[in-house]
Amino acid sequence: MTTETTAPSRWTQQLTARVRAVDAARPWLWDGLLTLGWTTAALVDAAGGWRNVARDPSLPSGLIVLLSLALSLPLYARRRRPTTVLALMAPAALVSEASGAFLQAAFLQALPLFHIALTRPPRRLLGAFALLVPPVLVGGLRFDGDEWDQHVVPILWAYVIVALLGITVRSRRDHTASLVDRARRLEIERDQEVRLAAAAERARIAREMHDIIGHNLSVITGLADGGRYAAAKSPERAAQALDAIGTTSRQALDELRRLLGVLSAPDDAPSAAARTPQPTLEDLESLLEGVRKAGLPVAAELPAPLPPLPPGAQLTVYRVIQESLTNTLKHAGPGASATVRVAAAPDALLVTVTDTGTPSAAPGQGQGLTGMRERAALYDGTLDSGPLPDGAGWQVRLRIPTTPEEHRP
């Protein structure tokens, strides 16, 4: 049943679309066919049928043919210049009514009237009716006497209905155009949102790649340097360094696979890598142990138990500590040490990472610090970094709110 009711409708829509496409490409074709059709009808009526309604059937045939042509040929330009067309037809309509011919071709004035209502400002309708009313009044008053209204009123009502039809079609067309324009704007907004989301995702990936690769390579470098020095004197220490290098490398590869797995997995079918949990506060001890093996002494003050935070906020704390210790490994110089303090305040988690490196060797304003600040801002947190007041070290301070209403989704 559904197919029977929708197939004709679909066929009609396709046919209408094709007709509109042809009309848009060759408007002269439709205008010419319509003008030819109505001109033929007017001339057929002029051959003798006009006498059936005429008040004066004795009028010469030449005048009737001339009036019929004057009322039909201007229709060719009705869509481009409807007001001009109506102005050209009005004298012929006036002669038709005043002479008593009462040609039915005069009703063709409804076509330019429709296009005036459809495409021109509403005030143009006043001028149109100023052209339409006088001929009808002249004919009614001259030939119908006291019953002139029986001739005038039906014709004027017909013209009013045509004008209202044009206004209705125009309103629906404008409404449709408004909906299309709104849909286009919404599509543009969606495209902008997609681009912004893509840019944010690229920034997030850049931060993750920077943290994973930068930290693990720094640890591996420290382990390799220590292993090289220990190779001659303590082969066991060198072997331990190589084991640690292997462990750190595998951890880095696992994290990279997890990150790339998130990128390659379809939205509706996340991969196993995508489901692998990101580092949390529980992984801080492993992080600190890896840094210590790389040769950086790290003292840690961690609360027990660790405060509850959303997974994203825990990852932020982990990455900030990781980046801070990586910068210490890279910039603090030989003999430096670091201290990590994590404290739970009533409404926030406070993280402080301090090293004993020289401020001149402190990290610059590169991707690392920018990434840390962006991570903190995602959870309404704040991050400050700079040299210690006495000039003997560098400090990073992070504050992450822990109250539920402050967390962003």
Image (cartoon, rainbow, N blue to C red):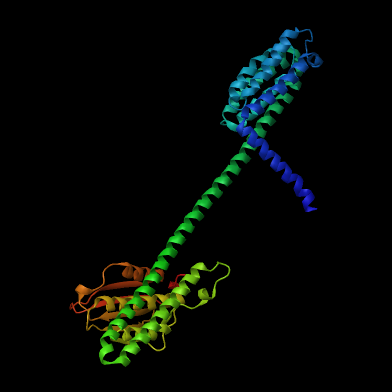
Residue 241 appears left or right of 387: right
- Is any part of residue 403 visible from this angle? no
Quarter of the image for residue 396 reads bottom left
Query: Against 203, is 239 above or below?
Result: below
Residue 338 appears left or right of 79: left
Residue 209 appears left or right of 161: left
Residue depicted at 69% across the width and 42% down the height: 14
Who is closer to the viewer here, 105 or 372?
Answer: 372
Residue 232 appears left or right of 207: left
Q: How many labels does the image show?
A: 0
Query: Against 12, is 71 above or below?
Result: above
Residue depicted at 51% across the width and 73% down the height: 274
Residue depicted at 80% across the width and 53% down the height: 1
Q: Position of residue 208 (x, y in %)?
A: 40, 71
Query: Against 240, is 20 above or below?
Result: above
Quarter of the image for residue 85 reads top right
Q: Position of residue 338 (x, y in %)?
A: 27, 83
Q: Position of residue 13 (x, y in %)?
A: 70, 42
Query: Against 148, is 223 above or below?
Result: below
Who is closer to the viewer here, 300 or 322?
Answer: 322
Who is closer to the viewer here, 392 or 109?
Answer: 392
- Is any part of residue 303 visible from this angle? yes
Q: Extreme left residue here?
A: 390
Who is closer to the viewer here, 5 or 45?
Answer: 5
Q: Extreme front residue here?
A: 232
Q: Position of residue 277 (x, y in %)?
A: 48, 78
Quarter of the image for residue 213 reads bottom left
